[in-house]
Image (tube, rainbow, N blue to C red):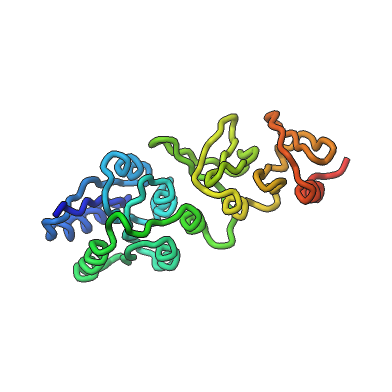
Amino acid sequence: MSPLRVAIVDDEELARAVVREHLAGHPDVEVVAECANGLEAIEAVAAQAPDLLFLDVQMPRLTGFETLELLDPRPAVVFVTAYDRHAVKAFEVNAVDYLLKPFSKERFDAALAKARTLVGPGAARPDPSALAAAARPEGVPLERIAVREGTRVSLLPVESVDWVKAEDDYVLIRSGGRSHLKHQTLADLAARLPGGRFVRVHRSWVVNVSRLAALEEGRIAVMADGERVPVSRAGAARLRERVPKG
């Protein structure tokens, strides 16, 4: 049998060492990468294609959920964290298991055994919508949008976003004069953007009202970057509620 290929992602070196030590007793496991943050993990997964991640939740720059959202391909994941408040979200995104620090070797071995039964071509993997939901506190609008191009990751402050357009199961996000493609539906992203700033003006478009230059005949929104956005009847009504008169 091929060895189980594992990557360890945690910003604390001691925490990585604990996982590495527990894995050392399993000769059928190969540690193919150790990463101190989500950015390193994205590069390592692209290069090494591990079967399984042991992934911390609370890390600088990118959280564990944000990291997993940007991975392609997405390995199976065991979350490893000192905080129990993330457990429900972890299982909502089909995590194999959730190890709460500090954990015993017996508890670790049980998670690894479970992972062995679930890793493979038919295994469930987190979907983008579930991960996007898990990446932010419940009821709190997004403050940033994480996007990936190759191994490069950009964190877009929502206030910098001009508009968002649906592209099948992706969204095209215009921000700072650049366009970014993200694997997420428009409906899902629109539900997480601050309602006071963003308006869904058409089934395929969401606009930042602060970037609106003009509304032509009520059916075309001219954005500050020159983009001309179609506006539905309902979208025009929503825009008029948000845009000051005069």
Residue at the extreme right of the image, as rendered:
246
Return the x and y of residue 203 as percentages of the image width and height: 67, 48
Depth check: give the residue in front, 145 or 124.
124
Image quadrant in which you'd find residue 149:
top left
Q: Is residue 134 above or below residue 149?
A: below
Q: Residue at x 80, y 37 (%)?
A: 215
Q: Residue at x 22, y 51 (%)?
A: 5
The answer to whether residue 104 is left or right of residue 67 is: left
Return the x and y of residue 177 as percentages of the image width and height: 59, 29
Count of number-bearing discs = 0
User: Which quadrant is the N terminus positioned in?
Assistant: bottom left
The answer to whether residue 179 is left or right of residue 71 is: right
Depth check: give the residue in front, 238 or 142.
238
Depth check: give the residue in front, 119 or 192.
119
Return the x and y of residue 141 as percentages of the image width and height: 60, 54
Q: Residue at x 39, y 68 (%)?
A: 84
Return the x and y of residue 108 as percentages of the image width and height: 23, 66
Image quadrant in which you'd find residue 222:
top right
Q: Is residue 81 above or below residue 180?
A: below
User: Which quadrant is the C terminus positioned in?
Assistant: top right
Depth check: give the residue in front, 22 or 132.
132
Residue at the extreme front of the image, as rendered:
122
The answer to whether residue 59 is left or right of residue 49 is: right
